[in-house]
Amino acid sequence: MEPIRPPKRLPDHSREALPDFVQRQFDAASPQNDHRQLYGILQRGIRSAVLAAGTQLPPSRVLAQVLQIARNTVVHVYEQLALEGYVQAGVGRGTFVAAVGPRLADRSTAPRPALPPDRSALLSRRGSQLVREAGAAPLQWGAFTPGVPEVRMFPTAIWSRLQARAARRQTPAQLTYATGPGDAGLRQAVSDYLQGTRGVVCSPEQVVITSGTQQSLHLVAQLLTDPGDKVWLEDPGYWGARSVFRAHGLQLEPVALDDEGMAPSPAQLRQPPRVMFLSPSHQYPLGAVMGHGRRQQLLDYAAVHGVWVVEDDYDSEFRYGTRPLPALQGLDTQGRVVYLGTFSKTLYPALRIAYLVLPPDLVNGFAQALNELFREGQTVQQAVLAQFLSEGHYATHIRRMRAVYSARHDALIHAIGQEFGSQLPILGGDAGLHLVLGLPPQVDDAAVAQAALRAGISTRPLSLYHLRQPAATKGLMLGYGAVPEGEIGPSFARLAQVVRGFL
């Protein structure tokens, strides 16, 4: 570590060459590096006109000696200021402060608008509502964060080998902005996988690759709706869809659930929406499974009334004791279903690769909008993922993780029974990466979640997922995907201690 150098007073003969403004402010003991500190002092001086236009700065050698810093540091600062137009320099002429132009207002005398005491009020009404009602969790790891997979068991060695191979074969087209609906190999691999495991009826040409489900939802909202259009949402349901649709100015209509998921009332059926958003194979967050009859009823309704059905199939690979159910999309004969899938739950969230399966007439519009609005990339990563799927590594990983998650699911069910017996209900406990621990209606589940976080446990209040807050059911979302089996019991015991304080 360099010794702390005391600030130096300037010798008398350089007082005129180096303004007092710089002399007072340069601190050799500052933790900020010399380049950044000197640049900031000179830039502020010029912008505030303390260093007036035409002022000659001292030669770099003199200033370096006075401040006891490297001459190259001063040279680089002068060069940066010259590039940004703050100074003018010429060989043999010296370095002079440039005229940076008149200021639009004198900040010392111009009246300042009164700022609201709450700085968040600076946002637009739409932005304020989005922030106020945001559902994204501050933590995305640990017991019992919902929706997080076990990333520590991802086959990194295989992935690294495929990445190295792709890097050796990459083309210029893969290193520039992406065009079209995504990597052709990945679209083919996704199509093959969905047809073989999810009952999706599609060709590779119907697949559009996106950077996550949220981006897919933005495209749906921008291309299939106009501000003021009505969208049906499961209540409780996925907060991410709620936020995207609200941000696009849509009218959100909560639809109650029954044992099969979305169950619109007769009054709602008389006023069709533009879009209905649902998760029929594993309702989020309560886990209901929609039967064939209900699926067909909603598809017939959508065909008659011109409704777009957005099917979110976010984690249907993970069912315990039964095979994954076929997708709703496979029953659609009228081209009304937009199918959403993601690799965030099956591989790892930071991959940020998801996909849409679209009716053929929508593909070109979605692909053009994707390129126009988002300027996609990650084409090399898409090629790697395509190989990961086509070589069978994806299917192997899914089989392995299904066994792991099943054991963790059982461990959490057992821990709940040990602590509460049958006192508290368990909802949605036969699939996915989470379950819901029901709480009595008088319990403030948001307060329980906050208290749990202070105890080192991350969970989410079920009421957060409701649009109709007066009718919100109470409970805690418990994600077990990222919690080792041996840690589930002790972690839940800590959570149970918190919960008991509210019962």
Image (cartoon, helix red, strand yellow):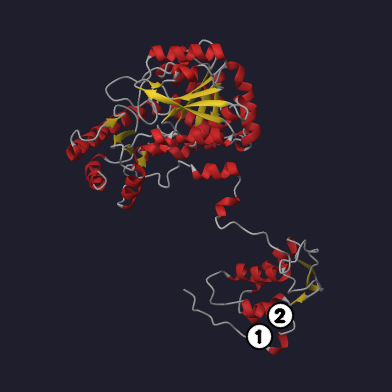
Rendered image quadrant of residue 324: top left
Above or below: residue 177 compared with residue 269: below
Label 1 sits on residue: 10
Secondary structure at numbered mark 1 = loop
Q: What residue type is disc 1 on?
A: Leu
Between 287 and 206, the residue placed more toward the observer is 287
Q: Earlier in the sequence, mark 2 or mark 1?
A: 1
Disc 2/disc 1 C-alpha distance (Å): 8 Å
* Residue drawn at point x = 40 percent, y = 28 percent: 394
User: Is 210 left or right of 392, judged from the image as shown?
Assistant: right
Q: What residue type is disc 2 on?
A: Leu
Question: Local crowd at mark 2 within 10 Å, few (<14), some, or many (≥20)?
Answer: some
Rendered image quadrant of residue 14: bottom right
**Tag 2–tag 1 contact (CB < 8 Å):** yes
Above or below: residue 216 compared with residue 119: above
Question: Which disc is residue 18 wearing?
Answer: 2
Between 332 and 277, the residue placed more toward the observer is 277
Percent position of residue 160, x then y: 44, 39
